[in-house]
Amino acid sequence: MEKFGIRDCNCASLRKAARRLTSFYDGQLAPSGLRATQFAILALVNEMEEVSVNAIAERLGLDRTTAGKNLRPLEQSGFVEVTSAKHDGRQRAIRVTKAGHAALKVAVPLWRRAQERFEAANGPEKAAALRDTLRSMEFEPQ
């Protein structure tokens, strides 16, 4: 049988690295009760103050269904609330609750520590270069 060079597969390599990095951040954030994906969404909603599911999906590179699915545990935990948007009562908006702010107060120092540990292990220049490279990746020829 022909060998396909799976070790050189960009997708497989990136997915493996993403799983390892997510596991690392999940472990660092565990004392807060938040997983890395939940922290990212909660921090984004906090940063944007009032945001739609579509805006969350767009900012995090998710489809709307996945963003909504990932929001559900945060809403069930009372960390976010879904209400009528201030600018248009017909639209729905997500906001961080007092409980969500309390969760972030615990999680942010843990996240910062994870960032510092990752950069200490890999070097701050290499970590910054990685973020820049990932942001600039093209997936189809121009």
Image: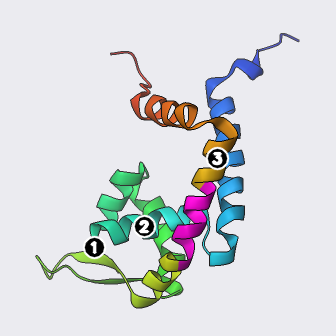
Give whichever of discs 3 and 2 has the lower sequence position.
Answer: 2
Compare residues 20 and 109 and report the one nearer the observer.
109
At label 2, which amino acid type do we have?
Ala
Which residue bears the numbered disc 1?
Answer: 49
Mark 2 surroundings: few (<14), some (14-19) or many (≥20) residues within 10 A: some
Mark 1 surroundings: few (<14), some (14-19) or many (≥20) residues within 10 A: few
* Disc 1/disc 3 C-alpha distance (Å): 28 Å
At label 3, which amino acid type do we have?
Phe
Residues drawn in magenta:
106-114
- Horizontal placement of 140 versus 48: left or right? right
* Disc 1/disc 2 C-alpha distance (Å): 10 Å
Residue 109 forms part of the magenta stretch: yes
Q: Are marks 1 and 3 in contact (CB under 8 Å)?
A: no
Residue at image point 44% right, 62% down: 67
- Viewer-side label of 1, 3: 3
- Coordinates of residue 124 in the picture (x, y in percent): 55, 38
Which residue bears the numbered disc 2?
Answer: 43
- Coordinates of residue 59 in the picture (x, y in percent): 35, 53
Give whichever of discs 1 and 2 has the lower sequence position.
Answer: 2
- Horizontal placement of 139 versus 112: left or right? left
